[in-house]
Amino acid sequence: MAFAHLLEVDNLQTHLKLRDGTIRAVDGVSFTVDAGETLGIVGESGSGKSMTALSIMRLLPRAGDIIGGRVKFKDRVLTDLSEDEMEAVRGTEIAMIFQDPMTSLNPVYRTGWQVGEPLRIHQHVRARASVAAAVDLFKKVGIPDARRRVAQFPHMFSGGMRQRAMIAMGLSMSPSLLIADEPTTALDVTIQAQILDLLRTLNRDYGTATILITHNLGVVAGMCDRVIVMYAGRIVEQGRTEEVFMHPEHPYTWNLLHSLPRLDASEHQPLKPIVGSPPDMLKLPVGCKFQPRCGFAIARCGVEEPSLLRVREQLSRCWVTQGGTRLDGPNSGG
Amino acid sequence: MRNLKTWFPVRSGVVSRVVGYVRAVDGVDLTIREGETLGLVGESGCGKSTLGRTILRLVEPTAGEVYFRGKNILRLRRAAMRRMRRQMAIIFQDPFASLDPRQTVSQILGEALDIHGLAPSGRRRKERISELLDLVGLSPDLARRYPHEFSGGQRQRIGIARALAVDPTFIVCDEPISALDVSIQAQIINLLEQLQEKFRLTYLFIAHDLSVVKHISDRIAVMYVGKVVEVSPAKDLYGAPKHPYTSSLLSAIPIPDPRLERRRERIILKGDVASPVDPPSGCRFRTRCFKAQPRCAETEPPLDTVDLGEHQAACFYPM
């Protein structure tokens, strides 16, 4: 391959105009995705994880605007493309699936017709052939009775089936990158397991690189090669999933992992909650944005914002760990 | 609860003829012991929330009996039920939808006191409201604010304060943390645990997240399409589930540990949850079950098919 990375996001800045002011929804985010890999982006609501994805796809809501930075995909700079050129990339080379499969399908068209739409638009496949292709795609994503199912309308599909149909549509043009934004959040756990299994299989069999956006750390642990943790529009930690989970180098990640009840815990241990509330993006604190909620904070944290720098195996935006302190040391209180 | 059933009619056509029933709760026998937390888990539509509401008679059951401290509350008349209600409360999932946006916190909490005539004088009332806010970790200065001025976690604290207002002994917690951000969930779980210890509360804790339920519960009941399929002490369930549905549910829950996740064996179920309008014959899980035999379609296994004393499961071919 001629290019170093499949996707390169460089210092992305996206602003969102709200009634009460403008927020920096994405504030200087940089990362890369390589062919065939699965990258997780975790964060809470408002952390900027979905806005990052929508910026890459250039599908921002009207109030949103990319005001700086660059997104490069293969050899093209997406942020420089015209809307028509971008439209040709969407759905063919990069596909996106959303949290809510209920609203992502048009209720008045048959599912097979909708799933075949990218083929009709981008490859000028004829109507009948596009529906035949949809039958194959349905089989690929594990929708049983595909021939009958393509003739049905979305309301006849369960939530899990709709998400499968959306994934089938996303795959119709064999994209090299799939962005999945909370694809299983609206689904029950046994159905979530089915969809995650499907994404894993597709990644393995077709080498589709995946960006998986989720708030669920368990999902990341089972799916992703690397992970990015976002807080207040910034990346606060980035690294290989195993490193980040085994020895987090940012207090937010550390605290998140310690605040979750674990199914495999043998003893009842009181949870260590994160104090306070998620930040108000209109009134972000000076210095480190997590500092008001951080049990590790030192004086410098409230004055000056740290950069995202290498700490041992990963990158962390934290004065404390950059100064050499280990979060899992003997006096770690959180 | 004895053989509790709550069916909702499905109506169709211009004359709203009843064409069937959603058997949301369909023959449940369960006991909740004083001072314990019974966790109730299951997927959406399994009837767990309806069961919680039926126990409090927020929804009237179709059949069965509910005994609260020895009294069948389904037979109680309105006044007697009102007195009984003082011992019971509910905390809802959505702290945004369950608080009236036009009422201040003080009015929301005061209303609960007024209904039961718990704080007649203004001064006593004010004290009690401050006390309630203090209990849930909110400053009493916030009493004159409106719900929209609070974050999700704070709103859920108000919901908890409202539940505590009547000084209940039994609280149904209906998905109390599902709508909250991950970083807030542990705060609310810890608060519920502290309050339980302080006031010796009994909880029915309804949730779809088994890791949370396992953490907070003494015993766990697993529901599938209107039926309880397994009951067990919380500590036994993860290590030794008996019902194939429970074990697939457990294996479906991701654990935030990449090394463990890589080694884990997953049971991926086929198909979707069966319909409560027209449930399968025999065992309701058999249509998705990897252990199903012809017998499972013929006879419905009772909950004590597997009977290990404290641990019971409704399955002919247990794990």
Image (cartoon, rainbow, N blue to C red):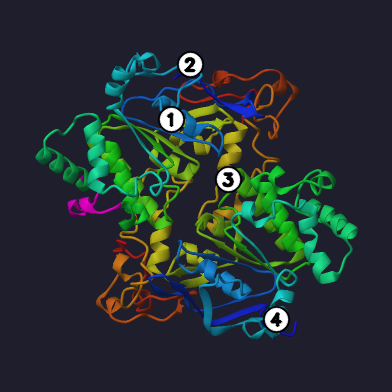
Q: Find the distance from the CA under tag 1 to the CA under tag 3.
A: 23 Å
> Of label 2 and label 1, which has the lower sequence position?
1
Q: Is residue A240 visible?
A: no
Q: Are marks 4 and 3 in contact (CB under 8 Å)?
A: no
Q: Find the distance from the CA under tag 2 to the CA under tag 4.
A: 65 Å
Helix, strand or loop at label 4? It is loop
Quadrant of the image occupied by residue A201: bottom right
Do tags 1 and 3 sit on the same chain?
no
Q: Which mark is residue B53?
A: 1
Give the magenta-colored segment's residue range: B135-146
Q: Residue at x 68, y 83 (%)?
A: A82
Question: What percent of the width, then of the height, locates residue B59?
Answer: 45, 27
On the image, numbered disc 2 is attached to which residue?
B64
On the image, numbered disc 3 is attached to which residue?
A189
> Furthest residue to the front?
B14
Q: Residue at x 87, y 55 (%)?
A: A132
Q: Residue at x 69, y 22 (%)?
A: B281
